[in-house]
Image (tube, rainbow, N blue to C red):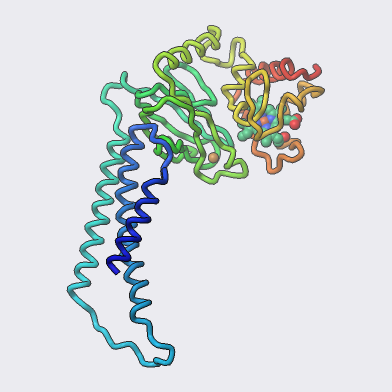
Amino acid sequence: MIVIGLLAGIVTGGVAYLIPWLPDQASTQAEEIDGVYWFVAIICAVVFSLVAGVSIYAGWKFRAPADDMDDGSPIHGHTGLEIWWTAIPTVLVVAMAVWSAVALARAETLPDNPDEYTTIEVTAAQFAWSFTYPELERTDGELVLRVNEPVELILTANDVIHAFWVPEFRMKQDAVPGIQTRTVITPTKEGSYDVICTELCGPGHPVMRAGVRVLSDADYEAWVAEGEEGAGGGEGGGDEGEADGASVFAEAGCESCHTLADADSEAEVGPDLDSVLPGQEEQQILTSIVDPNAEISEGYQPNVMPGDYEDRLSEAELDALVAYLVEVAGASR
Ligand code: HEC
Ligand SMILES: [Cu+2]
């Protein structure tokens, strides 16, 4: 039994070692969490192998012959064994709990000095994400982070419970209507990732994704500067002043679902705006945006387009958005 066990262990261990089980580690939190994950997984694998190995061996070795109708021999307790099989699991479970608590506390620790981290407000709604950068007075449909800078995410939801998850960052947190939750991420690798909603939130749940970009210092500064230009001196994209349709399209997260050549977006969750908009009236487009359930395009049931744009966007922003769509997608006025 020991020989078979060792051979099986070497083979499965070797295969397990060669498979990349987890996504890339792209944050310091990922390292903490993977440590806990592997600690628990290895304990589980060892305990499972022992229990399964002894069961299989016993079933084979002590199998009753077909004509043996006797009762098994009566057995009554074994204090020594009972002490061990209580003590060992207790130690293992306490070790897992302590390691997890320490890892979580370390993962969520922010530097004492507020200049050393950023805060971003994350709002989830059926079925899109939006990110507000208070220091930049900017809201966007994309999460943009500076590499190696800790970021505190303050999450909330407008309608039902959603959950924020970027597999490469590991940290996962619910976004709940009416309260604020938080999580901390320190991205360590430049690149593009996906925010994935991991709380079943309605028919659009599987498409509820948003982009994350982790940028180098220089690229991040360029992105900040680009936003300041885009704002065109308007006060924080507020209700008054000129709203710019192209940036509303990007900031409201339309890009994550619709193809529109002018915005360089190629998403295919909703209709391709370049092909459906020509020939539509301004009023019709506005209705499609503020009341998507009024008339659902064929093949898109159940509808997943968020129904709260009328609350999220000001009248000026909506007008600018419709004017922009009319202009770039060639709809008739
Ligand atoms: C979560 C995905 C999603 C987001 C975000 C989204 N849409 Fe949609 N959109 C859809 C789907 C799906 C449909 C088709 C169902 C319907 O007609 O409501 C649709 C329909 C439309 C239509 C009607 C198209 C037609 O066939 O006439 C327009 C116009 C539109 N969206 C514009 C926008 C704009 C502008 C935004 C950003 C403010 C946006 N959408 C955000 C998914 C989305
Ligand atoms: Cu969701």
Residue 126 placed where, x, y %?
Answer: 58, 37
Q: In which quarter of the image is residue 323?
A: top right
Along the line of sight, the residue nearer the viewer: 173 or 69: 69
Residue in view at x 19 percent, y 69 percent: 83
Residue 50 placed where, x, y %?
Answer: 31, 65
Which quadrant would the N terminus be assigned to in this image? bottom left
In the picture shown, does residue 42 fall above or below 5? above
In the picture shown, does residue 99 fall above or below 124? below
In the picture, measured across the screen, residue 217 lies left or right of residue 275, that is left
Residue 90 appears in view: yes
Residue 229 placed where, x, y %?
Answer: 53, 8
Residue in view at x 63 percent, y 20 percent: 263
Along the line of sight, the residue nearer the viewer: 292 or 264: 264
State the residue lying farthest toward the top: 233
Residue 147 placed where, x, y %?
Answer: 38, 23
State the residue lying farthest toward the left: 80
Residue in view at x 68 percent, y 40 percent: 303
Residue in view at x 45 percent, y 41 percent: 174
| Image region (quadrant) for ligand 1 | top right
How many numbered tags mark residues here? 0
Residue 310 appears in view: no
Along the line of sight, the residue nearer the viewer: 80 or 11: 11
In the picture shown, does residue 129 fall above or below 40? above
Which quadrant would the C terminus be assigned to in this image? top right
